[in-house]
Image (cartoon, rainbow, N blue to C red):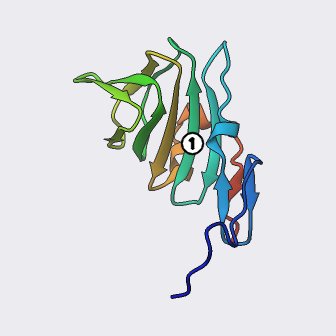
């Protein structure tokens, strides 16, 4: 193993996305945009087997009750949100990760300005076909091409 001096071969990324053939860096600080009228949804990556989505909420904004045909991992990066299902209300804050099984009816409510990263698996295409409305019309920054 060769030791490289600190910073050698590293690049500072100031763009929303820096790309090489096998490596993509997403600067979430740059991509997070807050809107006053509704949550801002940005599909970051669509790999075919998983979709990664960044959602920025102003305090009080919400995603209405819906179901996802795929399993969802919700990671709160900033702020506090509540996930409501018919059986349970879960409070999430920065640093927490929640796994929600497919087809569970749920809503999301921001208690503060918040930033949430979603990973939807295993079949985002099926999610689109079965009506995961919050992603309809959002073009990914990066999509796998075969």
- How far across and how far down the image is residue 25, in percent? 66, 56
Residue located beneath label 1 in the image: 53
Name the outermost residue toward the bottom: 1
- How far across and how far down the image is residue 67, in percent? 42, 33
- How far across and how far down the image is residue 9, in percent? 70, 72
- Quarter of the figure that contains the C terminus: bottom right
Q: Is the residue marked by circle 1 packed among few (<14), some (14-19), or many (20+) residues within 10 Å?
A: many
User: Does residue 11 lie above or below 114 as drawn?
Assistant: below
Q: Quadrant of residue 103?
A: top left
User: Does residue 48 lie above or below 33 as drawn?
Assistant: below
Name the outermost residue toward the left: 87
User: Does residue 33 lie above or below 135 as drawn?
Assistant: above
- How far across and how far down the image is residue 2, in percent? 56, 86
Q: Nearer the viewer, residue 30 or 90?
A: 30
Q: Residue sitting at 67 percent across and 61 percent down?
A: 24
Lateral position of residue 82 relative to residue 86, left or right: right
Find numbered disc 1 in the image and state the secondary structure of the residue it sits on: strand
Lateral position of residue 45 relative to residue 100, left or right: right
Lateral position of residue 63 relative to residue 36, left or right: left
Q: Residue sitting at 66 percent across and 66 percent down?
A: 7
User: Does residue 136 lie above or below 80 as drawn?
Assistant: below
Q: Nearer the viewer, residue 26 or 50?
A: 26
Q: Residue sitting at 42 percent across and 39 percent down?
A: 74
């Amino acid at each position: 193993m060769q030791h490289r001096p600190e910073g050698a071969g590293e690049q500072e990324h100031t763009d929303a996305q820096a790309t090489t053939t096998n490596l993509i860096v997403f600067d979430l600080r740059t991509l997070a945009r807050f809107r006053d009228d509704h949550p801002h949804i940005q599909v970051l990556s669509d790999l075919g087997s998983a979709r990664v989505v960044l959602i920025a909420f102003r305090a009080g904004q919400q995603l209405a009750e819906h179901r996802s045909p795929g399993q969802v991992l919700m990671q709160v990066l900033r702020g506090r949100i509540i996930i409501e299902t018919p059986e349970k209300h879960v409070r999430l804050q920065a640093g927490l990760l929640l796994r929600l099984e497919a087809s569970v009816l749920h809503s999301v409510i921001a208690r503060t300005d918040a930033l949430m990263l979603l990973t939807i698996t295993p079949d985002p295409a099926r999610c689109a076909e079965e009506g995961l409305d919050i992603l309809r019309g959002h073009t990914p920054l990066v999509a796998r091409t075969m």
